[in-house]
Image: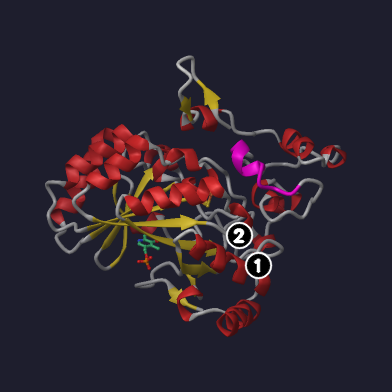
Amino acid sequence: MITVSPGARITSPDWRQLWRDSITDGRELLELLDLGHLADQWPAEDAGFALRVPRGFAARMRRGDPRDPLLLQALPQLAELAQVPGFVADAVGDLAAREAQGVLHKYQGRALLIASGSCAINCRYCFRRHFPYGDEVAAAGQWREALEHVAQDKSINELILSGGDPLALATSKLEELGRGLADLPHVTRLRIHTRLPVVLPERIDGPFVAWLRSLPLQKVIVLHANHANEFDEAVDAACARLRDAGATLLNQSVLLRDINDDADALVDLSERLFAAGVLPYYLHQLDRVQGAAHFEVADARALALVEAMRARLPGYLVPKLVREIGGDPAKRPV
Ligand SMILES: *Cc1c(COP(=O)(O)O)cnc(C)c1O
Ligand code: SF4
């Protein structure tokens, strides 16, 4: 959507405004998709994790298709209420890896900051849907505790911003972090894991790009897209701006039953990513978080899908199939 301001200058709407304007009512989402007849069966319980979808992302969902792969990532299902053995609140041992406020340090050389507790979209499969963000956000108090921790540990050369979604923070908050990092010469890389360039590409605005470009570090941005349909021209443009600011772009996906668990969908995703200048990095087996059991794909099927990708794609477009196991020194290959 483009708005024309009084001076007849074309400006995109402010991303915060678009965020506030997100869809939070499942009935409204279903009506928009010409699925109003299903709204009678709604509201399904949201299991304590509210529905949230930016309108631009909803516009990429197919109308009239209750199995749309983008809709299924966002719409609460009754299956979330099932208690399935082995599916727990802290599926990957995050609470055990906490070293300072919002700092998780599991792997050699890399510290992960839970930068923000917010996301522009609430993904039903998310492994952090039960994480106690309230007290655990690294950005609190000018990032002080987190930066002090990283200052003390000279083995950390890569800082990873995760969340929630770190780009949910105001650019001024990111600038604050950038200034703190200037005093930490052992940190040479900044990595940002974010779904915002895909679900709300307007977030990649001028001030953010200027900040990113100004950082005297190597910059890696790991997008989270699970299906080729998540891309459109606005997302392509956001990716181009990120690359232009000097960032290397990677993607990680989660293998999700009925959403992307077929070879065509995965091949299309890799091709679409590369068309946007993004390399596939990880394909994650689902973290076994309570409420997400219905998305799980068996390992044997996951391996067969990756084999099928290998037969059809150049090696650089085949992501690594991994799973996160609490206590492991790295993501574990499946
Ligand atoms: C996944 C993860 C990382 C990054 O792992 P890579 O394999 O380097 O992508 C770092 N820290 C934590 C706590 C993680 O969960
Ligand atoms: S942390 Fe990522 S996967 Fe989880 S809800 Fe937020 S955007 Fe979705």
Residue 325: within the magenta? no
Residue that badge 2 annotates: 228
Q: Is residue 113 left or right of residue 43?
A: left
Q: Nearer the viewer, residue 295 or 245?
A: 245
Where residue 333 appears, x then y in whole percent? 46, 78
For the residue with label 2, is its CB less than 8 Å from the closest atom of ligand 2?
A: no
Kindly give the residue lying farthest to the top in the view shown: 6
Residue in view at x 58 percent, y 28 percent: 21
Name the quadrant containing residue 43.
Answer: top right
**Which range of residues does the magenta coloring cover?**
53-62
Residue type at numbered disc 1: Ala
The answer to whether residue 61 is magenta is yes
Helix, strand, or loop for circle 1?
helix
- Residue 103 drawn above or below residue 200: below
As drawn, 187 above or below 310: above
Residue at coordinates 45% horizontally, 46% vertically from top-left?
Answer: 164
Please give the name of the residue rendered at 33% of the width and 35% of the height, measured from the top-left corner: 207
Whole-angstrom CA distance, mark 2 to mark 1, is 7 Å
In the rendered image, is residue 282 in sight?
yes
Q: Are marks 2 and 1 in contact (CB under 8 Å)?
A: yes
In the picture of the structure, the residue carrying the numbered disc 1 is: 265
In the image, residue 231 lies at what x, y percent?
57, 53
Picture quarter with the N terminus: top right
Q: Nearer the viewer, residue 124 or 273?
A: 273
